[in-house]
Amino acid sequence: MKKIAILGSTGSIGTQTLDVIQRNKDKFVVTALSCGHNVDLFRKQLKELSPALACVAEEKDALELKKEFPGTEILCGREGLKILAAQADADMEVSALLGMMGIEPVLAAIEAGKDIAFANKETLVAGGSLVMEAVRRKGVAFLPVDSEHSAIFQALRAADGNSVHKIILTASGGPFRGFTAKELASVTKAQALKHPNWSMGAKITIDSATMMNKGLEVIEASWLFDTDPAKIEVVVHPQSAIHSAVEFEDGSIIAQIGAPDMRIPIAYALAFPDRVPDAGKKFSFFDLGTMTFEKPDLKVFKCLALAYSAIEGGRSYPIVLNAANEEAVAAFLADRISFTQIADVVEEALNDHIVTVITSLDDILEVERESRLAVQNYISTKLL
């Protein structure tokens, strides 16, 4: 039985992780859970799983849960989350937290010698150098849950010491694939939240619509697989059957193919190096019929171009990219800016940024704080 702690158990990845675990009760047991503000769902999870340790965002919620679940130690807030990550009786911790809040607990878990299954892009986008140095130093497993990075990880197992020519990172193209810049200018929030293939949370669904998610994934892949970003090619593949691929020096390409079901890469990370028989939907070539591939239009989907620009700038630029995007997406979801203004906000933040050398977590958090304040001010004074 592998002991699992889930950071962010009420979100999309968290709930799907629990579904995989419930399907494979003979292989996994949940020992710790955390959530933000969805306390109603969290209460149901605590009742069903009885973990030894749990954490919620607010102290008032923690006080109520302590009365209801005396057998579970209930922590709260940012410090509580770091304590849970470091002290949970777990073989593996699933990082399903949203945004920058994932970095500190992941670093705490790594320092405590825990293996990590991560679905939090920001952990590597903003903190890649610190995180990967800690992973190497502590000798822990750091396994990707995102379908694309899981696919690359699986394909690279065929390398057997051979050189990689390039990584092929596939993208569905989102709900606005094929749109012109003029057409994008009038899209609605409801349209942007309708992903054609995947079931995800609101923020990542918007990132998919702008293609920022693919830019973040390029940065993530460059850290995770120690690869020059210039060797990471984004290919639009609307059927989402090939989740990503690796091309070797001889021209051979190894791709991972499967149904667009996040439970499959989740299960692979949880059980690695084994596979579980009941993970998710099965794939059929006959049902799919055809597969098509396109180049992304960087002039229309500016966020992907901006991400490549941030990668080239290096140092603090990816932190600014991520923070500005989070603020812009939040503003769009709150109906404060338009869809195309998401890219405008990020571009403004990158243009105004004075590059900073990153040597510590405090450096990352300070750049993030300054970037968020600058973006909030820009939106309030220039766009509203």
Image (cartoon, rainbow, N blue to C red):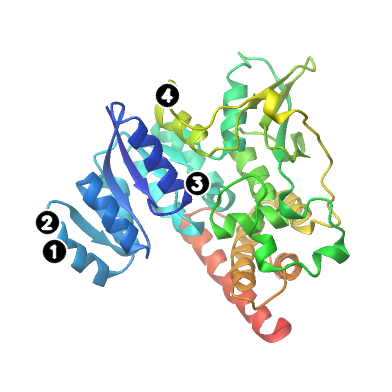
Give the mark nearer the N terminus: 3 vs 4.
3
Q: Which residue is mark 3?
A: 130
Quarter residue 219 falls in: top right
Give the mark nearer the N terminus: 4 vs 1.
1
Is residue 232 among the parts visible in the rendering? yes
Q: Tell which tag, 4 or 2, sits nearer the viewer.
A: 4
User: Is label 1 in a helix, a strand or a loop?
Assistant: helix
Q: Could you tell me residue 179's position as x and y percent? A: 84, 56
Residue with the most extreme front position: 287
Q: Where residue 218 is drawn, which disc sits there?
A: none
Residue contact at pointers 2 and 1, CB within 8 angstroms? yes
Q: Tell which tag, 3 or 1, sits nearer the viewer.
A: 1
User: Is label 4 in a helix, a strand or a loop?
Assistant: loop
Q: Which residue is mark 4?
A: 276
Q: Residue at x 68, y 28 (%)?
A: 287
Q: Where residue 70 is drawn, which disc sits there?
A: 2
Quarter residue 222 falls in: top right
Give the mark nearer the N terminus: 4 vs 2.
2
The alpha-carbon separation of the residues under discs 4 and 1 comes to 37 Å
Q: Tell which tag, 3 or 4, sits nearer the viewer.
A: 4
Classify residue 121 as left or right of residue 51.
right
Give the mark nearer the N terminus: 3 vs 1.
1
Q: Where residue 67 is drawn, which disc sits there?
A: 1
Q: Could you tell me residue 383's position as x and y percent? A: 72, 81
Residue contact at pointers 4 and 2, CB within 8 angstroms? no
**Vertical relation: 310 (above or below) 19:** below
